[in-house]
Image (spheres, rainbow, N blue to C red):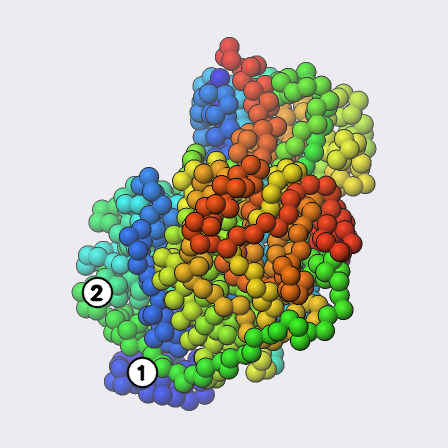
Amino acid sequence: MIPNEPKITPELVAEHGLKPDEYERILKLIGREPSFTELGIFSAMWNEHCSYKSSRLHLRGLPTKAPWVIQGPGENAGVIDIGDGLAAVFKMESHNHPSYIEPYQGAGTGVGGILRDVFTMGARPIAALNALRFGDPTHPRTRHLVGGVVAGIGGYGNSFGVPTVGGLVGFHTRYDGNCLVNAMAVGLAEADKIFYAKATGVGLPVVYLGSKTGRDGIHGATMASAEFGEGAEEKRPTVQVGDPFAEKLLLEACLEIMAAGCVVAIQDMGAAGLTCSAVEMGAKGDLGIELNLDNVPCREAGMSAYEMMLSESQERMLMVIAPGKEEQAEAIFRKWGLDFAIVGHTTDTLRFVVKHKGEVVADLPIKELGDEAPLYDRPWTETPRQQRIDPASLSISATVPGALERLIGSPDFASKRWIWEQYDHLILNNTVQRPGGDAAVVRVEDGPRALALTTDVTPRYCEADPFEGGKQAVAECWRNITAVGARPLALTDNLNFGNPEKPEIMGQLVGCIRGIAEAARALDFPVVSGNVSLYNETFGRAILPTPTIGGVGVLTDVEKMATLAFKDSGETILVIGATTGWLGQSAFLYEILNREDGAPPPVDLALERKHGDFVRALIDEGLVTAVHDVSDGGLLVALAEMAMASGIGATLIGPPAGMNPHAFWFGEDQARYVVTTASAKSAILKRAEAAGIPIAKLGSTGGDRLNLPGERPIIVDALRERHEAWLPIYMGAGRM
Amino acid sequence: MKSAVILFPGSNREGDVARAIAGICGTKPNIVWHADSELPPGTDLVVLPGGFSYGDYLRCGAIAARAGIMPAVHAHAAKGGLVLGICNGFQILCESGLLPGVLVRNARLRFICREALLRVERIDTPFTRRYAKNAIVRFPVAHGEGNYTADAETLRRLEGDGRVIFRYVTASGQRDDEQVLNGAANSIAGIASEKLNVLGLMPHPENHVDPLLGSTDGRPLFESLASVLERA
């Protein structure tokens, strides 16, 4: 008889985030009323965050395979072959809800969680990235969140010792009540030495490693599966507290016992802690697990079974240890000053049995805990299409230089130096391309191989047309990797949306996933890991649909890497890809005309591939000196970024006859790159013509200003000053 | 030359400095565990690397300064042996009394990872002999607590004895104590012991040794050590 204290009431069930029909499902599954601890276990396993119950059905449509994919979704992280017997292990994950409640710890533990996912697989983390979205800068909470999130990411990653090499930061009023913190980590492992969660062998010890278990983070994953309303701050106790020092020790100890051959299976304790990790190891290996909580290292006395099973204390791991290796494993952990405790063993019963103080507090079928989680085919409606905007219909008073100056100094486009200078982006001595380029480039060991890494999404496009927006996020990520000369290999997706129980939100999720799937398939850029964050809503207002894409590509010779800065005066500037002047959902429309309407630019995936492959070949052959992808802000923003990065100006040729100049300079047509060349202009033009790729001369580099026909010159230094000024001033820190 | 890099729990730039030494000086350093009590026999150079020893949850470097290996490091220094402390290593040297003063939170209370310009104040030391006189060099900094502070008497003595080896300067090569990136007194980035055999500095020469990564200004520091120790 399992004791039941407190009594299970409909209110208690609801507090656990379980709907009445979900509770019925539990009753049917186990044939009796669950114990309090069991109810907690179900709530941990069946919440949106852990079960993907609203998204699972649609995620099946994502392409996940390629010859270079070693492990796709379903493990702690994705694994791809990058050549030379090495593998890149990577994933992105959100920590949105906790970061809004407690930005420093929420963001820090987001970084900690994703690093753990990577080293759980036997990989040493070599780079971290992130994608951050905050509310309108004038919202009273925004500055506090920016400061706290950035300090939290830096505080964790810097101490752990991983370079934070890239990311994106955006602002929009729709994130006023829900900021987004998406953290990505990339690790390096030998391709034949990857570790998995799947347990094998009956009667083997299940070992608890790392920090002690405390009362922090209880119900964290359940909290992250609900909307915010009044009193979101009161949820602060559900946020975990990070200890990067403990994580660093855990990393070194784990890699050491893996190398010593002690590990059969390993799973980190992330969301839903001990519960989720134990169930996953057993279920994946078709084994039962029996835990004895009396042996769990606790931070404080008197913790109940319920608390231990649901704690999300950080920096903990669960492992199945190889027979006879317990002593060796323990010695390694003790050396690093970490807890090591045998807390259970594998069984052949397929039951998940939890004992505490001599009593059985949970006894559940282990496979069904995961497999029988609710799966919803939620109703959804298609987002209504918007009309294409005719530039001639716009009344524009800003001059082209004036509009550029406003754009370049606006929150979304302003330099993020104030942020990335708080991240150690140089540790490990491999950061070949630092923050500020199209993609970060990190050398692999002593080279010449390197990885190109980036995170991308344009939420405005996704809101207007989820399918095209989903496509565009993948295409832009692929383009950024291409623009540094790398071959894009695979991606991780972090899908951030509102409440999926609303058909229009569900429609955004479905549309974006379909768009991602189509682009990933067309570009041979499979999805190998990911994370879904739903219920990003406050008082019924949802965030913009934000499917962040994190991409990994490989450069076989890092010496050939391209950067976006102009290199010298007197070089020819070319644009590859057609410019039609597409202003719908553009940054120009948003920043200059205060409008967010029109259809977003369509993404022709065949052209993306064709143009990208063309540019990559030019880089590989050394025919171009600078390369930059054209994304939001259009041609002139791209050119300004190339000028500001170098201090070299340019004299530019205006739009073709009949084209509105604002549309020409600020339109956001896709599949475009700006390149410069010192001496290969005619060769490049000839090749483009032969391949049927639109290419046009934009001007030539030189001087200290951007000269546009018929417009006042734009001084590059003054533009850079505007570009660098906004964020430090906003954060109240002056110019430093 | 025989070198030892001390590995404390939470050290994280030991690999960077070991790689720089191996690549420039030609011999791989021994990685020595903090809890050991002896340095490998014949050690010429001891390096205390960057990182967050013990999480830096107490004063930076305070716990590491009391690690099992530190008496051996003191003995090595007392014999005139060379000791190099970078970033957290500099903090540990100060906390252990091998160098005077202390490193506190950056003046703007934020971590800073950025390239800094430094002037090499003297080149008659085992760490700087391969630099040009008054050279201006570019090393990255990556620290939250690099604000060097000492009492007025100590600062006067350091300056009087010429023990400030690296100093932050502005783009024009001038010292500007008001604008110094972390608030350090007298714009101090690195100081040496009286006998010039112990050097502590906040910036990271080991991260600027490869042209692919943007600068090789850190190389002469390791070349200096190699040239001093090559007979050893």
- Which label number is shown at residue A286? 2
Identify the secondary structure beneath mark 1: helix
Q: Nearer the viewer, residue A512 or B63?
A: A512
Left or right, B175 with respect to A193, comes to: right
Label 2, residues with CA under 10 Å away: few <14, some 14-19, many ≥20: many
Q: Would you say A316 lies left or right of A190 here?
A: right
Identify the residue position indicated by label 1 in the image: A26
Q: Mark 1 is on which residue type? A: Ile
Chain letter of the residue carrying label 1:
A
Q: Which mark is residue A90?
A: none
Q: Position of residue B100 (x, y in %)?
A: 70, 30
Parent chain of label 2: A
Looking at the picture, how far across and down is residue B130, in whole percent? 62, 18
User: Mark 2 belongs to which amino acid?
Assistant: Asp
| SS at mark 2 in the image | loop
Residue farthest toward the front in the current orientation of the protein = A657
Q: Is residue B94 above or below residue A366?
A: above
Task: Tell me which numbered mark, 2 or 1, is placed earlier along the sequence.
Answer: 1
Which image quadrant for residue B154?
A: top right
Q: Is residue A205 left or right of residue A406?
A: left
Q: How many marks?
A: 2
Most foreground residue, A343 or A100? A100
Q: For the point 58% across and 37% down, which residue is it?
A: A678
